[in-house]
Image: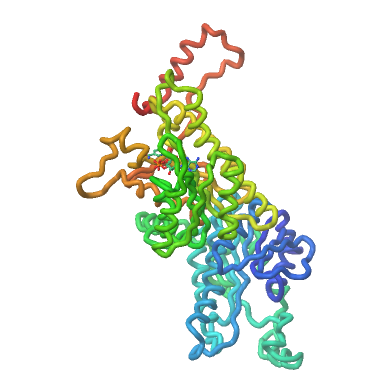
Amino acid sequence: MALDLDLDGAVALVTGGVRGVGSGITRALRAAGARVVICARNEPDTLDDGVEFATCDVRNPDDVGRLVDGIVARHGRLDVAVNNAGGAPFADAADASPNFHSKVVALNLLAPLTVAQRTNAVMQRQDSGGAIVNISSVSGARPSPGTAAYGAAKAGLENLTTSLAVEWAPKVRVNAVRVGMVETERAAMHYGDAEGVAAVGATVPVGRLARPDEIGDCVAFLASARASYVSGVGADRARRGRGARLPRGGQRRHRDPVRHRAGRSAAEQGAGVSGIVRDRVVVVTGAGRGIGREHALAFAREGAKVVVNDVGVALDGSGTSGGPAEQVVAEIAASGGEAVANTDDVADWAGAERVVGTALATFGRLDVLVNNAGFLRDRMLVNLDEQEWDAVLRVHLTGHFAMLRHAGAHWRAEAKAGRTPDARIINTSSGAGLLGSVGQGNYSAAKAGIAGLTLVASAELARYGVTVNGIAPAARTRMTETAFADDMAAPDGGFDAMDPGNVSPLVVWLGSAGSAHVTGRMFEVDGGRVCLMEGWRHGPREDKGARWEPGELGPVVRKLIDAAPEPEPVYGA
Ligand SMILES: NC(=O)c1ccc[n+]([C@@H]2O[C@H](COP(=O)([O-])OP(=O)(O)OC[C@H]3O[C@@H](n4cnc5c(N)ncnc54)[C@H](O)[C@@H]3O)[C@@H](O)[C@H]2O)c1
């Protein structure tokens, strides 16, 4: 009976799958029915049927993020990841530079870890999980003179394979194939002409070098459900019948849960690690003062290039001035960062387009949009005039939409051109929008609108590699220092909870590559507090199965209200 590997409908990624061993793996996965995406730094001249190509330097985590997000956006899933890209030129360990060694380790050890991390995140969300196969080498198991760093990296890759297999079981299986000598199209470079290849082949018990397709078959087997009980092994060990088992659930349960959680959160939040948004291009609107200024400075401190937008209006939205934006740019430049000022009005359609254009023209890309600009015209509803209503709705709600619309259209075009971004939008709502605030009917309505817009945008833009979240901050700025003077006052000493800089770390993290799994969420943030807000959700219900009479509904509504939690009070009520 033929062994049916049945990868029909599965989606596989093969790094460096263009030639050599990688092309053998690609052919084998195709033959088993998978759709295969291969990646390399340069596009090959020809592609086999059913194989897609994506440009990616696997050593660059942003590139890898875009690659994986692009596959998920196009195919809705990712079942198999093969870390095949690798290799190293010959160099004596005694003379090779530290930079050479770190590049070899980056390609052969760190890049597979990055690819595994990104693909695992997708596979863990799939009911059917997934399989990761790392291509190792006999150089990792025996002395490797002339390619010492390569051998060390491959040994590390095998150890990594076993750790990931334990950590990610049972959903994701992780295995390694320890490859010996293979007759690729570059065999002559290593072993000389046909006679040389034959001579080297004679030293192997089988009497010849392996063919790329034979490695491919082994990988396809490990990727298939036929290997569903195989994880955490190198293929050579599996052959000897040792260790071919899934890590037991007990191993996971017995770990110290506190240490486990602490490790996770440090990695996820980038705690204590600087540069979590290094080289990302960020637009912060209303960044000339208050909370927006703090966002711009915090992004720059973490390595981002910042477009500091601010039209420079008074607290009630009147007047304009380029001063605040220029001043923040000067502050960033003085501490060695990169920033550019823009003074467009975010609620003006063409102005919002120019803000996005400033990022593209100055820095060549856009990764993060922080919508923050706004002003207040507070009044009790019965005194609020049409102009005050329109102006506040315009700057907050239209301002958020206009920016989101132009940035979103840019990212969609990028995704369609095969460069799916790893982009972020962070909107600024308010407790006034989420819970209501007396005397701020216009502002509360605009900020509630922003919460709704955040949900829709997160659902619509996910396919283009964009996450959309919101914050409801509280901090001492000109917006609050008079109206809420007591709550906002700075203490004589100790932690200044209302310092506007306290809001920015969460926004920077939401703007980083590490937040890719978070979208459609709203966080209240002030001082040292981060609170995930839970919005409207279906509560108690009664269904008569027919139309109600108005007179029947009094007791029904009473029963529903009795069964529901009390709503939180409106601010100032
Ligand atoms: N301070 C708080 O406690 C608090 C609470 C909840 C929400 N917010 C929200 O946080 C954001 C920032 O507020 P802040 O307290 O830092 O206020 P702020 O007045 O100090 O800063 C707002 C900045 O936005 C700019 N701006 C206004 N209209 C603009 C436009 N059309 N285009 C470009 N720039 C424009 C202003 O010139 C100003 O520099 C606002 O959206 C606000 O509603 C603040």
Q: Residue at x 70, y 76 (%)?
A: 20
Snapshot colouring = rainbow
Residue 465 in sight = yes
Which residue is nearer to you in this view: 14 or 454?
454
Picture coordinates of residue 84, whole percent (x, y): 63, 71
Location of the C terminus by quadrant is top left
Is residue 441 shown left or right of residue 194? left
Identity of the residue furthest to the left in this view: 492
Q: Residue at x 53, y 39 (%)?
A: 399
Picture coordinates of residue 188, whole percent (x, y): 72, 87
Residue 138 vertical placement versus 424 (above, below): below
Residue 562 vertical placement versus 260 (above, below): above
Picture coordinates of residue 251, whole percent (x, y): 43, 60
Location of the N terminus by quadrant is bottom right
Q: Residue at x 76, y 90 (%)?
A: 194
Is residue 354 shown left or right of residue 184? left
Quadrant of the image occupied by residue 420: bottom right
Quadrant of the image occupied by residue 24: bottom right
Quadrant of the image occupied by residue 30: bottom right
Picture coordinates of residue 109, whole percent (x, y): 53, 72
Q: Quadrant of ligand 1?
A: top left
Q: Residue at x 69, y 53 (%)?
A: 416
Which residue is nearer to you in this view: 510 or 195?
510
Residue 517 in sight = no
Residue 187 vertical placement versus 413 (above, below): below
Is residue 445 shown left or right of residue 53? left
